[in-house]
Image: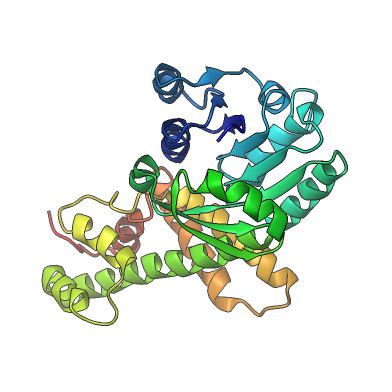
Amino acid sequence: MNKKIGFIGVGMMGHGIAKNLLEKGFPVTAMAHRNRAPLEDLLQKGAGEASTPFAIAESSDVIILCVTGSPEVEQCMYGDDGIIAGCRSGSIVIDCSTAEPTSTDRIAADLKAKGVTLVDAPLARTPVEAEEGRLNTMVGADDKAFDEVKPILAAYCENIFHVGGPGAGHKVKLINNFLAMSQAALTAEALCACGATGVDPRKFYDVISAGGVNSPVFQMIVSNALEGDYSGLKFSLANGEKDLRYYNRMTEAAGLTNSLGRNLHHTFVQGMKLGFSEGYVGSLIEAQAKLNNVEIIGK
């Protein structure tokens, strides 16, 4: 518990993670994210503040990144005020983002040259579980690094999966999100089919909820959508598009035909082009309704 934690990315997920680290006794130094409100709350709970990734790295044993994707991770890593310039030999970087594996490999090699270990530990579940300290994480690390970071991960995760060596966590996360986003897109199209054929979506919801096709993704999206709320699954359409783009690059590099992945990515791009780029994945339902000129849920 005496390892000093530097935290970058105290947004919707990051605030809960950093809060739980503080509550479990870890000293935490954090940077402001898009606004200062989450950081101010952490400061009141005993966190310290730093202004740059360099300063975070310079003063920390373990640096945790909870940012959107590879461009943001690379921005934190490189440059005169970046982590690689400020980190010291023996420290560890835990990357909680959903990142592109080729970028992860390059960053891991650059950190290793400075005697620093990169652990990829992307997350599953939502900001609600982040606040409760009940996230899931899939960890890519060698056995020694995994044993070292496990007590830290346990401060904010209910389920910790060691899925392989360095880089494996990000690969598993992309495949996980491909499956989750597939369910979201299928659900949206199925509801559109209800609207187009005169099926009551509430009756459809009851049938699916009682059968083998039911899933947490279906419940989070549809139970709220029936009341006109498309934010039940708090994962943005833009992040879904980004993750599917990364997934397609990864699978294409592996030689897969990947027709489902490409079509799914097109569905998300289409939803954004139809005006829902600021929405959550549940807005795929609205996109299907607009595309097909079908009233799905009703007024």
The residue sitting at 82% across, 35% down in the picture is 89
- In percent of width and height, residue 109 lies at 83, 49
- In percent of width and height, residue 82 lies at 74, 28
Give the residue at the far bottom of this rendering.
212
Where, by quadrant of the figure, is residue 63 drawn? Answer: top right
Nearer to the camera, 191 or 252: 252
Give the residue at the far right of this rendering.
113
The residue sitting at 25% across, 69% down in the picture is 191
Query: Which quarter of the figure is the N terminus placed in?
Result: top right
Residue 85 placement, left or right of 275:
right
The correct choice, above or below, for 252 with respect to 105 in the image is below
- In percent of width and height, residue 143 lies at 69, 60
Residue 32 placement, left or right of 221:
right
Nearer to the camera, 63 or 24: 24
- In percent of width and height, residue 275 lies at 40, 47
Q: Is residue 199 visible?
A: no
Nearer to the camera, 66 or 89: 89
The residue sitting at 68% across, 63% down in the picture is 249
The correct choice, above or below, for 204 with respect to 47 in the image is below
